[in-house]
Image (cartoon, grey):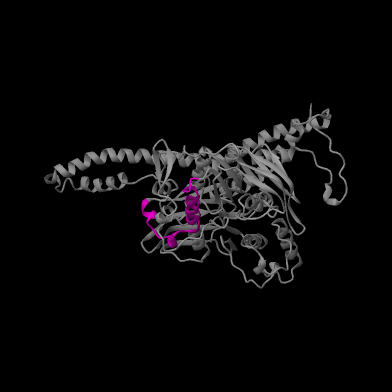
Amino acid sequence: MAKDTPYLDVQHLKKSFGSLLLFDDISFSVAEGQHVGLIAKNGTGKSTLLNILIGHEGYDSGEIIYRRDIRVAMLEQSPTFDPQESVLDACFNHQGDPEKVLKAKQILTKLKIRDLQQPMGQLSGGQQKRVALANVLITEPDFLILDEPTNHLDLEMIEWLEGFLQRGNKTLLMVTHDRYFLDRVCSVIIELDDRTIYTYRGNYAYYLEKRQERIDNKRAEIMRANNLYRTELDWMRRMPQARGHKAKYREEAFYELERVARQRIEERQVRLKSRNVYIGSKIFECQYVSKAFGEHVILKDFYYNFSRFEKMGIVGNNGTGKSTFIKMLLGQVAPDAGRFDIGDTVNFGYFSQEGLQFDEQQKVIDVVKDIAEYIDMGGGKHFTASQLLQYFLFIPEQQHNYVYKLSGGERRKLYLCTVLMRNPNFLVLDEPTNDLDIVTLQILEEYLQDFSGCVIVVSHDRYFMDKIVDHLLVFEGDGVVKDFPGNYTQYRQWQALKPQEEPTAKSGKESAPKKDYRHDTRRRMTFKEKMEFERLTKEIEQLETEKSQIEQSLCSGALSIDELTDKSKRLPVLNDELDQKSMRWLELSEIES
């Protein structure tokens, strides 16, 4: 097989489950060194497609061709392990290879898995997913297929994985809802929409732009077809005698025109704005709350007074107590000391990680109607259960399906609808983005931006947090919680620029008094630093120009396989250089010249 053969070549693939056609005649390829992101709505076959590619599911027709002798590994959405084997043995058959064992320990530590002899049956589902991720990274395959790799990772782990995948000559095909991750890691986006594959040779930002162009063009095509269809339909009805041999072509063209005209582009025509959500001036007061599990301290004498219309994000590493804080607020877990004083008008809507247990034999519409027939929007307007489901992309046919037919992502979406159908004035969302597709996340973001009540979001989705929250509660561990007045990106920028802190009380010693850098006289740049600053300014400009040229080339469709491979390899290296030089440039820019 030729050297420039793609790592993966999919031709005319078709898959259906009974009468449900997932995709038909789809074709795409993944070249060596490419980082490809797969985007699709929940229930349209993303995970099924990945399982077909790895050989875990069959397909109706088509061809799947891998380059000969390459090693392929897949991170499944819900991996399974022998509950008796240890973490280290579950990763790979290392056969005593000390180098492999060392690499395993390093990667598992980065993913916060530290007891390598612990039986897999004792780990949570999230920890097992991290062990599975470590497994595919440790074995260093030629081609990585990743299904939701950022699920169950905290922000620190996500950023580490982002950097790990950007470096080197890895070939990737991944499904992820994390749009910053997608934007920074992937240089090609393929979208599965309406049973068809569309390829965009650029990152997520480029995809958004070109997808909108595609939809606008499709909308214009359908509008033209509808106008012409009305004329042709009139001819078909009035002129049956004209349909002789010479007019046969026109009759055939009419049916093709009818097919185009009857296509639809699913979109929501209105933003869902509930004007009948009232919440009083008193929301909740967290009065010097303490909570610990043994020696593991979650909160210590924590005080916070929540304001009306506040939209707060909660971030922190896994195990620092974010979900416990939420459960104490909702009265599900009792604090060791202190109390939560909740306002009388507060009506919580809680979207938890565990989710709702549904009756599998119930219809989707009935699940929501059991909660309420409609939401009172104010001004005499109502929003019915069916309208809410349609707003979140359950088309009428799907609303009358049984719950057991839904995918995992569709169940999460249905659970979200049941929370919103209660018309709460205070939404508490614990990891709401897990397993939801990007389109649903965009709809939820729009809903929350318009929401006139209060919101608390616990999430590792940086893009989602940036769009929704006004400020952050940062859980740092050992009972330390800090309030940051900004979104997640601003918090990370602040973290990168702040001076290194002295050793904390963790070491058992008093830390030295910290200087107040805001009021200190700032030092001036040395001559060497000035020269470095000027050099970095030029280098960053050159690197950004090169990056722009590479991205344009990748999108041109005019590159050979070798050129495509070389540029796909260069782009992540370029991004790394830009990140490092930009961070140093920011540090120097803070020093007075």
Of 249 and 282, nearer the camera is 282
Q: Is residue 47 above or below residue 482?
A: below
- Residue drawn at x 32%, y 38% as measured from the top left: 223
Instruction: Tell whether 62 sits left or right of 501.
Output: left
The picture places residue 471, in percent across and down from the top left corner, at: 64, 39
Q: Is residue 307 above or below residue 16?
A: above
Where is residue 586? Give x, y as percent: 73, 34
The reply to whether residue 180 is in sight is no
Residue at the (66%, 40%) spot, across then down: 305
Query: For this rendering, which residue is in front, 530 or 542?
Result: 530
Residue placed most toward the observer, 532 or 125: 125
Principal secondary structure, stretch drawn in magenta: helix
Query: Which span is picked out in magenta?
Result: 396-423
**Which residue reaches farthest bottom?**
84
Corner quadrant of residue 108:
bottom right
Q: Magenta includes 408?
A: yes
Q: Is 7 colored magenta in this rendering?
A: no
Q: Please name the residue shown 14% across and 43% down the image.
A: 239
Residue that protrudes farthest toward the top in the picture: 593
> Image check: 305 left or right of 216?
right
Looking at the picture, how far across and down is residue 350, in whole percent? Answer: 55, 50
Q: Is residue 266 left or right of residue 460?
A: left
Q: Is residue 103 above or below residue 269?
A: below
User: Among all residues in the image, which is located at the extreme front?
Assistant: 344
Q: Residue 284, can we see it?
A: yes
Quadrant (top left, top right, bottom left, bottom right) of the C terminus = top right
Compared to residue 90, the image places residue 353 above or below, namely above
Q: Residue at x 69, y 55 (%)?
A: 319
Tell me where residue 306 sits by quadrant: top right
